Amino acid sequence: MPPERRQRQAQPVLRSPKGHKALQPYSYEPIRDDGYLRYLILDPAKGDEPLSGSLIIKHINEALEFDAVSYVWGKPRRVDKIICDGKSISITASLRDALRRIRLPDTPRNLWADQICINQGDLEERGHQVQLMGKIFLRSSTTLLWLGGAAYSDVKDIQSLVADVNNMVEPDLLGVNRDWEKLPALSLTHPIFEDKRWISFSKMTHCEWFKRVWIVQEAGLSRNPLIIYGSHEFEWDSWNLVLAWVSHRGFSIASDYDIIWNPLHVSRAQIWTESNQVSKSENGADINGRGSEEEWSLPEILHSARYLQATDPRDHVYAFLGHPSATHAVSKELLLIPDYTAKALDVYLDFAVRWSEWANDLSILSYVQHESEGEIKKNPASWVPIWNTKLPMNSISTNISGGFNAGMERTAMPRVLKSSLQVRGVIFDTLDYTSEILREEDLEWRDGVPQDSQTVTLWKNILLHIAASSPGGLFGNQTSFLAKALTPLYCGSLSGYQSDANAHIAAFIMSRIAISKVEISPDLLGFLQAASMGGDPHLVESDCRISYGRRLGISQSAYYALIPPNARKGDLCCIFFGGNTPFIIRPGPAGAGLAGHYQFVGEAYVSGIMEGQIVKRFQRGEFQEQDIILV
């Protein structure tokens, strides 16, 4: 590349220790060739002695063994320096502390750290090296996950807790072939639930490192990730087994001690597998090499990373280009080439277009979650997920094991038309009622809810609209009808409690009627009381998390649905052939005057059609197939 296109990184002249001349800023030699990286040979030293070393450019396949450093930049101000080849590079306090902690006292150490090894002032090099980062972390001998400093007492507590939980859980987990769902639950009287060492463990999970978007790939691709926290080092697998146990079997511990986690960390083994690639045969058919239902698609990973932080919104995509499915299994082509001169919304559009073409399915649509009515109009295309929005909603399509099959097995074959997406499907109904947006407090059992509260008003409206749409009226003996109407709140899945599902559902219905103070017939009240014997409404409430942030909707034909927060009366209910779930779309204004053009509102759960029932009715001639163009 022409030298004149390069922008040298401007750095202030820094003063060296007393008695020495001022150090000149380091001038980066450009990296012009694919596959080349710059790594640091860090000089040995101890304690607070100055940092120094040399930068070497080598092809990634020819570089000496090196360790990669995964850390949080922290405050952007560069308050310290490292002397490289006699010149200075400014660094943040966080990297300074990390390098001091991991350097060796008597021998050099080869390291790769992005703040030093990438010329951050050169956008072209930055994009080129970001493209290479997946290979860098795969190539590194060890990835050093620097969480920061910690009190010695906390470190010792965590060290012993990790050992104890591993010894307690590992034998049983091996006995059930590492299937967490089959792992026996401990009695809540077990001493581990009252162990105060969880306080120290909780502090660790709140470290900034766990909140950043880049670290998912850095830890995920590593052959040997090693956590460095204060004075101690933790093997990733041993430490993560504790986090996985808490997330699967220690809910009360997580709640009592405020332990937080992101599933991207807990599910590392399922996310970064080489079999999770997308390729196509010569005739264009999808050959998605997923080895099991446990593996995650790239859009699913980007969705879970919405809650992580990135200084640059483009990194919500670029930080995952090291994932196996971001490289075509046949052509070895990368899904996107990082470009830090492109606008973030254009990066999201390019990703959606490329993924739809590669995967040849509609999975990308399950992750569209518009923050507001205005966002639908402002975004480059309504069907494109905006990955840096942070809405409290999980994807409906991945809410249960095995997913749904509303569009049946017919190949989706979407067509990208510039920024539009053309699909084939059936519009089968129109929304006639939408509730207020459901909040967590609306779906919890509480005594003494004020009658003028938003929760009471919401449930009165929901139950009355269900009654109005019921063929026989809610307030007769229509328990099964009411259960069907409320099924969307938990998307038909009750977390393994199916044997007592009717009792739990009846108890849940009783709790909603009690909250709203809606009058019901004595016959129905007696029936519900008998049916709810042994039922626990809390079990249903816990499964209603999927509905947080969404609305309950009723269509003109009395279909009951869980719908996006921006759905409104008059929106259309449809299925796309090959899609997992139904979807909500809206004619105009972007498609006004254009037949078949619609805005995409989002995915939905609709009772009674999640396993292809609409497709079967279409096959009987009850509906017409049509081209639907999402704009």
Image (tube, helix red, strand yellow):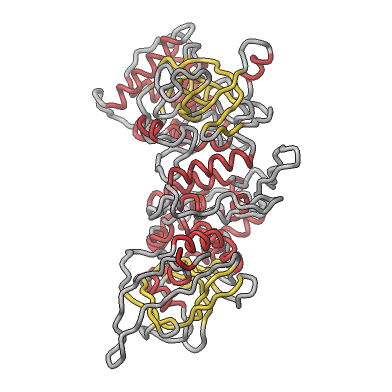
Which of the 4 quarters of the picture holds residue 11? bottom left
> Measured from the top left, where is residue 259 in percent x and y?
41, 54
**Rendered location of residue 222, percent (x, y):** 58, 64
> From what the image shows, is residue 55 above or below residue 476?
below
Left or right: residue 373 compared with residue 599: left
Which of the two residues, 624 or 441, is positioned nearer the viewer here?
Answer: 624
Which residue shows up at 40% across the image and 39% down it?
391
Residue 430 visible at all: yes
- Regarding residue 223, the answer to whether it shows in the image is no
Q: Residue at x 59, y 63 (%)?
A: 135
Residue 618 in percent (x, y) is at 64, 15
Within the image, what quadrant is residue 496 found in? top right
Q: Quadrant of residue 538?
A: top left
Nearest the eye: 43 or 101: 43
User: Residue at coordinates 62% horizontally, 47% vertically from top-left?
Assistant: 295
Please indicate whether residue 147 sits to the left or right of residue 335 in the image.
left
Residue placed most toward the observer, 499 or 591:
591
Is 32 rendered above or below residue 615?
Answer: below
